[in-house]
């Protein structure tokens, strides 16, 4: 047995749990264990007889957290324009619940987008992960594409990276680039960790480029890609693992 005994005689065999979590066939998962690539509660496990409690123990493969609970749901949702970031709305406005309300799980939305902003929202019933991803201390980067009046002066990116003072304190962006420029308008991309209300709109207005249209296209490792407005897709095992890493879990 390992130095720290993680074996639970009433638990489930580790290779069976890994296989059911999508890490390959039972034999592939046995090889992951014997090669020393699997950790349980921070302890490398190399023996095939180990059983664990999936409800209380934490497993990593090659440093990536394994989701052991089959009832956990992780979705990317492309929020359309005009939809509010709540599961229901007492004023009768379109809400996220109109698109996923038929699911039996109670889903949390990770952060929010205002009604006039479209794009990527993460939905999950994993409350701990949702809470962590929203907490500023974990600084999960978010990528936005904005249409603004142009032309965009060359020093705008420098000003945004240096920090812009807003009424509730300074904000800096991690990255700013001009994606496209046409007569009278431009498309820009911003990456930032901030989650303050309307922060992208306020930032761009402060540097003289009020937002004409705004979309969030990436949260941490998860990209919107080809997902159409109003549609959801399940996150891949790799995306979920990367979100866990980003959230320090």
Image (cartoon, rainbow, N blue to C red):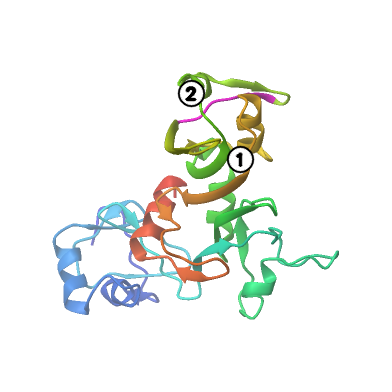
Whether the magenta-drawn stretch holds residue 172 is answered as yes
Give the magenta part as a residue range.
169-174
Residue denoted by label 1: 195
Question: Mark 1 against mark 2, which lies toward the viewer?
Answer: 2
Residue 211 vertical position relative to residue 173 in the rendered view, above or below = below
Toward the viewer: 48 or 103? 103
Q: Which residue is drawn at 48% across and 19% down?
A: 155
Q: Position of residue 42 (x, y in %)?
A: 33, 51
- Where does the N terminus fall, quadrant-wise? bottom left
- Total labels: the figure holds 2
Residue 83: mark: none
Coordinates of residue 111 in the picture (x, y in percent): 62, 51
Mark 1 touching mark 2, by CB under 8 A? no
Q: How crowded is mark 1: few (under 14 residues within 10 Å), some or many (20 or more)?
A: some
Label 1 residue SS: loop
Residue 179 located within the stretch drawn in magenta: no
Q: How many neighbours does mark 2 have within 10 angstroms: few (below 14), some (14-19), or many (20 or more)?
A: some
Residue 110's place in the image compared with 161, above or below, is below
Query: Left or right of 124: which side holds 56?
Result: left
Which residue is painted at 29% across and 51% down in the image? 63
Residue 225 coordinates in the image, percent (x, y): 41, 59
Q: Residue at the front extreme? A: 183
Q: Which mark is residue 161?
A: 2
Residue at 47% across, 25% down: 157
Q: Nearer the viewer, residue 137 or 53?
A: 137
Helix, strand or loop under label 2: helix
């Amino acid at each position: 047995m390992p130095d720290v005994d993680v074996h639970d005689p009433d638990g489930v065999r580790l290779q069976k749990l890994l296989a059911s979590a999508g890490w390959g066939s039972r034999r592939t998962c046995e090889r992951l264990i014997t090669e020393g690539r699997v950790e349980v509660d921070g302890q490398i496990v190399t023996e095939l007889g180990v059983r664990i409690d999936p409800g209380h123990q934490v497993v990593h493969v090659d440093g990536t957290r394994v989701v052991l609970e089959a009832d956990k749901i992780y979705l990317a949702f492309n929020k359309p324009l005009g939809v509010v970031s709540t599961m229901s709305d007492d004023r009768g406005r379109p809400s996220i619940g109109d698109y996923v309300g038929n699911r039996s799980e109670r889903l949390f939305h990770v952060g929010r987008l205002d009604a006039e902003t479209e794009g990527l929202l993460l939905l999950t019933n994993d409350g701990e992960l949702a809470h962590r991803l929203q907490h500023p201390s974990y600084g999960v980067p978010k990528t936005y594409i904005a249409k603004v009046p142009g032309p965009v002066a060359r020093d705008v990116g420098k000003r945004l990276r240096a920090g812009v003072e807003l009424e509730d304190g300074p904000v800096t962006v991690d990255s700013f680039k001009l994606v496209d420029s046409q007569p009278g308008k431009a498309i820009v991309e911003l990456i930032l960790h901030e989650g303050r209300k309307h922060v992208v709109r306020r930032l761009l207005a402060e540097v003289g480029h009020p937002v004409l249209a705004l979309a969030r296209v990436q949260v941490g490792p998860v990209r919107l890609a080809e997902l159409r407005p109003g549609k959801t897709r399940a996150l891949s095992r790799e995306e979920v693992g990367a979100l866990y890493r980003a959230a320090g879990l």
